Image: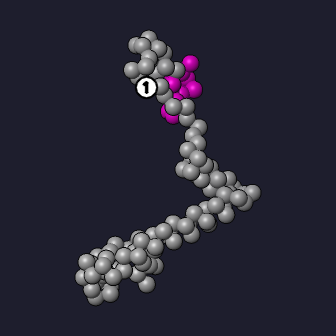
Amino acid sequence: MVESLSGFGIPQDEISKLLGIDPKTLRLHYAEQIELGGIKATAKVAQNLFNMACKPNREGLQAAIFWLRVRAHWSEYTPRPPAEALGKKAMAELEAGTAGQGTEWGHLVN
């Protein structure tokens, strides 16, 4: 039960209250179950996400995109060079070129 509750994200104080023991006693006697609960829950969710990402449907596409962003660090955004690496003129040109991105009036800029 401790492993399952820990995996669900129930705080240790609440688990100990449910069991009728002090939180220190819970950590002393159930440390492995507390640790394994989180690991097993994460593994199960990751397995489900992986299975979804492998399906040829809309949900699979969304799961695959999420998986690649998080696990493979993929991004549709090009990282911006550090400001100190650019001169004032180059930085102004960069900012002018992206001024309307993400706004409703972005198509008017350029």
Check residue 84 for magenta coloring: no
Tell me which corner region of the image, top left, top right, bottom left or bottom right, holds residue 88: top left
- The location of residue 51, given as percent across then percent down, is 67, 63
Q: How is the image coloured?
A: one colour
- Which residue in the rendered view is the most extreme toward the top? 89
Residue 31 in view here: yes
Mark 1 is on which residue type? Pro
Tell me which corner region of the image, top left, top right, bottom left or bottom right, holds residue 37: bottom left
Total numbered labels: 1
Local packing at callout 1 (Cα closer than 10 Å; few below 14, some 14-19, many 20+) is few
- State whether residue 97 is above or below residue 74: above
Secondary structure found at label 1: loop
Q: Give the main secondary structure of the magenta stretch.
A: loop
Drawn side of residue 24 relative to residue 59, left or right: left
- Which residue in the rendered view is the most extreme toward the right? 56
Residue 96 in view here: no
- State whether residue 82 is above or below residue 93: below
- The location of residue 99, given as percent across then percent down, is 48, 24
- Identify the residue at image location x=57%, y=40%: 75
Quarter of the picture containing the C terminus is top right
- Bounds of the magenta span? 98-110
Quarter of the picture containing the N terminus is bottom left
Front residue of 82/61: it is: 82
Residue under pointer 1 = 82
- Identify the residue at image location x=48%, y=28%: 80
- Identify the residue at image location x=30%, y=79%: 28
- The location of residue 86, given as percent across then percent down, is 44, 17
- State whether residue 61 is above or below residue 92: below
- Identify the residue at image location x=56%, y=69%: 44
- The location of residue 67, given as percent across then percent down, is 59, 53
